[in-house]
Amino acid sequence: MSMSKNIALPIDVVVGRKAARAALYEMGIWTLGQLTELALDDLLEIPGIGERTAKQIHAQANAHVNNAPFWIDKPPATISSEGIFIDIRVDPDTIPQWPWGFCWRTPNADPGFICVHPSREYTVELQQGWTVQFVPGLNSAWKLFAAQLLYETREIYFWGKVVLTHLQQTSAPDIQAQLKPRLVDLHKVFTDIVALPIKSTGLQPVAKYLGIEWADAKAPFEAHIPYLLWLEKQQPKFIQTACDYMLRNTEAVEHIWRWMLNEGE
């Protein structure tokens, strides 16, 4: 085991549940160094910790102790092919949260953008010559988005199960039936096969650790503000900002996907 400076870090760095920490304390496990030496079978004895969670806790402890990625498994065949990378932005004040913005891109191809307008359909050209298509209503947006994604037979990669939640809660059953078989949550794949010495597995922290330069942290709903300003003021800078946010997310997802394939062999 590495004798790095992180060996004495407390277990709460990787064990969030208080009950699980209490059980580990009773076993005499207080530091990440001790946690890396604990057998997986011993972790499984703790109520509420299953096999998947035990592997993740052990991997996270090793990653922090050695200050390096720790691999649990090889990348699965489900992510071996190039795919379509997507991002969906939502209104945080709706229940369920209703999408207003959709972005998709494939490697070496221009991205596409769809935004919802309350009452009319039109297009806007961005600085790079790309086009944002506004459609009147969420149902129309989902139909157009699905049509774009179904145009190719690639896998559809996204980050985090919330995207699937948006699909299930706000799209029609036929749209769900068309898209679900090809959707791949790269966040789940990532956390199943590798751990990083960072606290969060959110898209931005992971992408930044893996080399994506994010000048400043962006809140999940930050793109919603310029979208609303565009609807009100129709100034190009606002819709440009909203689309740049979505595009950056798809670029980050692709970056993580490529890193998993290149480093996980």
Image: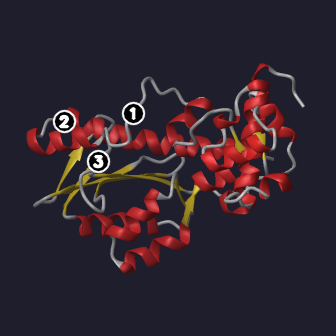
The one nearer the camera, 75 or 105, is 75
The reply to whether discs 1 and 2 touch (Cβ–Cβ < 8 Å) is no
Alpha carbon of mark 1 to alpha carbon of mark 3: how far? 24 Å
Circle 2 residues within 10 Å: few <14, some 14–19, many ≥20: some
- Given the image, on which type of amino acid does mark 1 rest? Lys
Residue 93 spot, x, y in % from top left = 24, 52
Label 2 sits on residue: 236
**Numbered disc in front, either 1 or 2:** 1
The reply to whether discs 3 and 2 touch (Cβ–Cβ < 8 Å) is no
Q: Residue furthest right?
A: 1
- Given the image, on which type of amino acid does mark 2 rest? Pro
N-term-proximal mark, 1 vs 2: 1
Label 3 sits on residue: 131
Q: From what the image shows, is residue 49 above or below residue 140?
A: above
Q: Can residue 177 be seen here?
A: yes
Q: From what the image shows, is residue 80 above or below residue 250?
A: below
